[in-house]
Amino acid sequence: MNVSYGLENIWLWFTALLEKLFGWFGLPYIFAYTIEKIIFAAALLAFISISVLFLIWMERKVSAHIQSRLGPMHVGGWHGWAQTIADMVKLLFKEDIIPAKADKWVHRIAPIVVFVPSLMAFLVIPFEKNLIGQDLNVGILLIFAFSSLAVLAIIMGGWASNNKYTLIGGIRSAAQMVSYEIPLVLSVLSVVMMVGSLKLNDIVEAQSRVWFVFSQPLAFMLYIIAGTAEVNRTPFDLPEAESEIVSGYNTEYSGLKYGFFMLSEFTNMLIVSLVAATVFMGGWLGPKWLPLPGIIWLLLKTYLIVFVLMWVRWTFPRLRVDRLMDFGWKILIPLAFINIFITGLFMVIFK
Amino acid sequence: MDFPFFNGQLITYGFFLLFATVAIASALLVVSVKNIMHSALFLALFLLSVAAMFFIFDADFLGIVQILLYIGGVIVLILFAVMLTSRVSSQLIQQTNEQKFLAIIVCIFLFGMLSYVIFTSGLKGFERPLVEGGITRNVGQLLMTVYVLPFEVASLVLLAALIGAMVIVGKKDE
Amino acid sequence: MVNEYLAVFIFLVIALGFTVAGLVTAFLVRNSNPNAEKESTYECGEEPVGGAWIQFNMRYYLFAILFVIFDVEIIFLYPWAVVFKDLGLFAFVEMVLFLGILVLGLAYCWKKGHLRWE
C-alpha cells in the first residue's frame, strides 16, 4: 500500500519545501503552517465546487435514466456536462427578491449560515493519510457539530421569509433533522468504541484487516438511513414536499441565495457519503494487490454510496410525517442502543 | 532570528481578540435588541465565539459540546419555544429592567471580583494543554473513575427532565 | 508547536470569504427591478392571508426537548466510548446503568403516547 506517487507525495513535497523556504528567512513555523492551510483550504474549495457541480449533473442523469429519459443532453456537448455550470451562471444573474414582509437581515444571513458549516466539515476528512486539512483529536465529532448548525440556518430561512409554507417547512425540517441526528451520531459511536479514538485517520487505520461495514453492519445501515434523513432526501424529503408545502423553507429564496441552499444540500450529501466511506468502508485503504493512490479508492467508495443514495431517491416514495417521526424514535434509536449494547458485550467477552 | 512579539503566538492572539470582541458585542446585543428572534440568534453567535475560545485554549471537547449541544440543541429549543409562543416572534419587546441601577451596581461588583480573582490567581495566559492527545480521553477516564457517581446521577437528572417535558406538554394516555 | 485548531479558524475565514464573495458578486452583476407584486409573500397566487408568525403546535417542542436530552447523553457517551477499550467490564456495567435509566424514560414516553405524531 505504500504508493510512491500520487497527490499525497506532491503535497508532502510542497509543504516540506514551503517550510524550508520559511526557515531560510528565519520566519517561525506558524507562518508556513498558515500558508499551507490556506492553500489546502482553497484546493479543497475547488474540489468541493467541482464535485457538487458534478453531483447535480449526476443526480439529473441518474434520475433520468431510472425514469427512461435522457436528462440534460445539449449544454456543453457531451451528454450535457455543462448543464449545472450554466444553471449556476443563471442563478448568479437572477434577480434577488426579498419579500416585503420578511426579516431582511436574517433572510440574507441564512444562506451563509447553511453553507459555511457544510464546507467546514471537510476539514477533518482524510483524503489520504497526509492529505487532510487537520487531523484533529475530536475528528468525527467536529463533523457532527458543524452539520448540526444546518438546523439553525433552516429555521432562520424559514422564519425570516414570513411565509406559512417556509415556516412549516423550516420547522418540519428542523424536527426531522434533530430526530435523525441522534441515531446518526449513535451509529458512529459503536465504531468509536472499537477504535478508541475520534481521529478519522485512526478510524481508517483500524480497518486495515476488516472494514467496519462487515463488523458493524447494523451501524452502517443505521448510518445510511439516518444520513439520508439528515440531508433531507427522499424518502425523507418532507421539508420540501412540493405537494404539501410548495418548496419548503427555501420557497421565498431566489438567485444565488437559493443556490446556496441547493448547493449545501449536495455538499451535505457529499459529506455523508465521504464519512460513510471513511468510517465504514476503509477510507483511503485499498487492496494490497492494486496499488492505486488512496484518494482514488476513497472517491470510488464515496461515489458508490452517492449512487446508492440517488438510486434510493428515485425508487421510493415519500414517507408520511407521522411515520417519519415514528420510524426515527421507535425503530432507529432503540436499534442504535441495542447495537451499542451488543458491541460493548462482545468487546467485554472477547477482550 | 528571533521575533520577540512577532512570533507564532501572534496569530492565535489575533483570533482570541477577534472572538472575544465578537462574544462581548453579541452578548450585549442579546440583552438590547428589540426582536426576540434576533436576541436568540445573537445568543447563538455568542456561544459560537465561546466555542472558538475553547478551541484556542485546546479544550477541544468543550468547544464541540458548545457547538453540538448549545447551538445545535439548546438554541434550536429556544427558537422553537419562541415560535410556539403565540405572536411573540413578530412583536417588538421591551428589554428594560425596573432595577436597572441595582443591576449596574451588581455587575460592577461582579466584574471587579472576577478581575481580582483572575489577576491574583497566577494564570499566565496562553499555556500549552495539560493532556496529550486532547481532553476527550481524559474526560472519559475521569467519568469512569473519580466521577462515576455524578455520572450516574446525571442520567437521573436527564430522566427528570424527560418526565418534566412530558408533564408540560400535557397528558396523552392511550 | 502550533495550536492545531488554527486550521479550523483558517478554514472558517476561507469558507466565509468564499460564500460572501459569491453573494457580493451576485449583488454586483444581477439586475434589480422590484415591485410590490413581486415582493408579496408567496401563497399559491392568492392574496396572502395574515402573517406567518403564528403559534405552533406543542409537539414540536417536546421533540426538541427529547433531542436535547439525548444530545446530552451522546456527549456523555463519546468520552466513554473513546476509553472503553482500556477499561472493560466496569465501564460496560456503568454505561448499561446510565443508558438503562434513559431507555426507561424513552419507554415511558412511548407508553404514554407522546412519541406519537398526529
Image (cartoon, grey):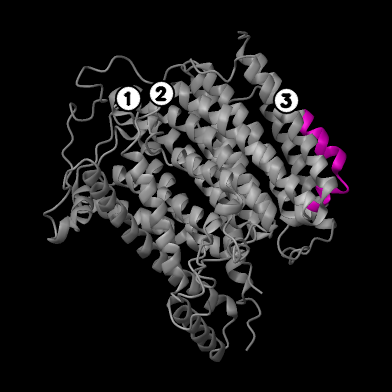
Give the x, y percent position of residue A147: 50, 46
Give the amino acid type for the residue marked by disc 2 in the picture.
Answer: Arg
Instruction: Give the label on residue A203, or none.
Output: none
Give the amino acid type for the residue marked by disc 3 in the picture.
Answer: Leu
Q: CA distance from mark 1 to mark 2?
A: 13 Å
Asked if disc 2 and disc 3 are in contact, CB closer than 8 Å, the reply is no
Q: Nearer the viewer, mark 3 or mark 1?
A: 3
Q: Nearer the viewer, mark 1 or mark 2?
A: 2
- Judging by the rendered image, the residue that carries numbered circle 1 is A245
**SS label for mark 3:** helix
Would residue C78 be found to the left or right of residue A221 on screen? right
Give the x, y percent position of residue A49: 33, 59
Same chain for labels 2 and 3? Say yes or no. Answer: no
Q: Magenta span: helix, strand or loop, mainly?
A: helix
Q: CA distance from mark 2 to mark 3?
A: 27 Å
Would residue A154 be found to the left or right of residue B68 on screen? left
Name the image quarter holding the N terminus of chain C: bottom right
Instruction: Give the label on residue C104, or none.
Output: 3
Residues in magenta?
A: B140-156
Which is nearer the eye, A340 or C57? A340
Furthest residue toward bottom: A24
- Judging by the rendered image, the residue that carries numbered circle 2 is A320
Give the x, y percent position of residue C95: 77, 40
Give the amino acid type for the residue marked by disc 1 in the picture.
Answer: Ile
Asked if disc 3 and disc 1 are in contact, CB closer than 8 Å, the reply is no
Label 3 marks a residue whose chain is: C
Residue C111 magenta: no
Q: Is residue A104 above or below residue B115?
A: above
Which is nearer the eye, A43 or B123? A43
Give the x, y percent position of residue B104: 70, 34
Residue name at image x 66 percent, y 41 percent: C74
